[in-house]
């Protein structure tokens, strides 16, 4: 099994290769104890090297390292900044404008409405409100939201600004007589529309003045651009609390952003890699796992490779989307694990022979068992260059040797 030969690996190539018929998914799982080399492997094989090949890479960075997520140095080394989503905003924090017309949910035809905004924008704002309230707005609330979304750009244009959440809230609170008359003749008045929009306006106000202040209520920061020349977007969600609505809402925005990116890239037959670092599945937002599951299902159509990290497979409840993802993977990188229960779970989920257990327990840092569907497991060592070692180092906090 260990040959000393160089092993090459590219999930897109294996997926397309007719000699690998059992390789049916571009989902990759990277599993192992903390400190054994998962992130280093993900950063080198699925971020730095694919970027050199011209692929687009998106990272969800959940793990804090010092003052930010652990992909900050990589983002800077590649000429961009992490998208730092920090409750309350502040210096160095990024913003995703909730009503940015470039970020609205694409419709099936991808077309904008005659008013020039993506038809899915209403749906996005509605979903954000529902995530906070725990239920959807009623139909009158949705209609008030639609009317305010139509009015918001005009209010911002009067000041030569891009419309933001605050314009939307203002328009919900001040429906315009002329607009209401032109929409409904005299059936309903501005006072009616004002009443319908109170719940939406209050919810958005609470969000803008609370956890999502500085996160969704300003113009979108340049590092969020889907066309960023770095080819890399790192969403640093390491400052967001695991409980409460903020993470779920931010994920909704990232998901929407990502759908737009994937639609654009798959239409041009370009591939994209989404790296989801360990820790995401422990968050209380159940929708997160569902979201990745959904993404994985669409991965073929979208030219997407989803790479997910895990350190405690035994924590993943049966039937959970995270466990399902791991099961679906056509590729697993199994790094060292010491606890018997974790080794057993890993082998059972990946349907591998028990004999591999001894090897997994004995793996040193930076070595793993590479399991590809339809092939014999290989014991490989992840060789990295000095430059890669410098930008991927997660010990910087301990040794004081920081890059970037
Ligand atoms: N392939 C490798 N080659 C050299 N050093 C490595 C390798 N993998 C990991 N390391 C070292 O181990 C440290 C921890 O690795 P990391 O990938 O962050 O672990 P994990 O993500 O599994 O917790 C790295 O900062 C690096 O110093
Ligand atoms: Mg890690």
Image (spheres, grey):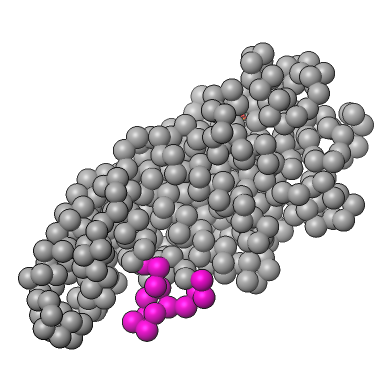
113 drawn magenta: yes
Query: At 64% across and 36% down in the image, what residue appears?
Result: 326
Relative to residue 85, is residue 138 drawn left or right?
left
Farthest-out residue, left: 191
Measured as percent of width and height from the top left, residue 180 is found at 15, 79
Q: Is residue 321 visible?
A: yes
Image quarter where the N terminus lies is top right
Establish if 291 lies above or below 125: above
369 drawn magenta: no
Q: What segment carries the magenta color?
A: 108-121
Query: At 66% across and 51% down in the image, what residue appears?
Result: 305
Measured as percent of width and height from the top left, residue 63 is found at 48, 35
Establish if 82 lies above or below 104: above
> Magenta part mainly helix, strand or loop?
loop
In terms of depth relative to the viewer, which is nearer, 349 or 58?
Answer: 349
Query: At 55% across and 51% down in the image, what residue appears?
Result: 294
In terms of depth relative to the viewer, which is nearer, 184 or 132?
Answer: 184
Q: Is residue 69 visible?
A: no
């Amino acid at each position: 099994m260990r040959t000393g030969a160089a092993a090459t690996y590219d999930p897109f190539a294996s997926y397309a290769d007719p000699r690998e018929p059992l390789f049916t998914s571009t989902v990759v799982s990277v599993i192992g104890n903390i400190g054994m080399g998962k992130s280093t492997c993900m950063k080198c094989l699925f971020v730095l090297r694919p970027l050199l090949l011209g692929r687009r890479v998106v990272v969800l960075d959940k793990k804090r390292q010092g003052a930010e997520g652990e992909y900050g140095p990589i983002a800077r080394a590649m000429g961009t900044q992490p998208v730092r989503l920090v409750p309350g905003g502040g210096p160095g924090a990024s913003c995703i404008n909730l009503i940015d017309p470039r970020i609205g949910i694409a419709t099936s035809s991808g077309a904008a409405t005659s008013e020039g905004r993506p038809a899915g924008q209403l749906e996005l704002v509605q979903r954000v409100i529902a995530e906070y309230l725990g239920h959807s707005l009623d139909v009158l609330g949705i209609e008030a939201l639609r009317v305010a979304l139509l009015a918001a750009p005009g209010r911002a244009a009067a000041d030569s600004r891009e419309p933001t959440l605050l314009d939307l809230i203002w328009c919900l609170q001040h429906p315009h007589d002329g607009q209401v008359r032109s929409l409904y003749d005299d059936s309903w008045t501005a006072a009616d529309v004002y009443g319908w929009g109170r719940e939406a306006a209050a919810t958005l106000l609470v969000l803008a003045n609370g956890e999502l202040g500085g996160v969704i209520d300003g113009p979108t920061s340049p590092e969020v651009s889907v066309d960023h020349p770095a080819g890399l977007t790192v969403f640093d969600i390491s400052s967001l609390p695991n409980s409460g609505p903020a993470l779920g809402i931010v994920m909704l925005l990232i998901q929407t952003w990502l759908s737009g990116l994937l639609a654009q890239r798959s239409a041009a037959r370009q591939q994209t890699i989404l790296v989801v670092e360990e820790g995401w599945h422990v968050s209380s937002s159940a929708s997160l796992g569902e979201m990745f599951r959904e993404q994985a299902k669409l991965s073929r159509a979208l030219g997407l490779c989803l790479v997910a990290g895990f350190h405690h497979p035994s924590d993943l409840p049966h039937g959970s989307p995270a466990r399902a993802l791991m099961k679906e993977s056509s590729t697993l990188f199994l790094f060292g694990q010491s606890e018997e229960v974790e080794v057993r779970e890993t082998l059972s989920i990946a349907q591998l022979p028990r004999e591999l257990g001894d090897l997994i327990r004995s793996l040193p840092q930076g070595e793993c068992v590479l399991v590809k569907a339809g092939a014999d497991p290989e014991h490989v060592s992840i060789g990295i260059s000095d430059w890669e070692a410098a930008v991927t180092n997660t010990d910087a906090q301990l040794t004081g040797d920081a890059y970037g």
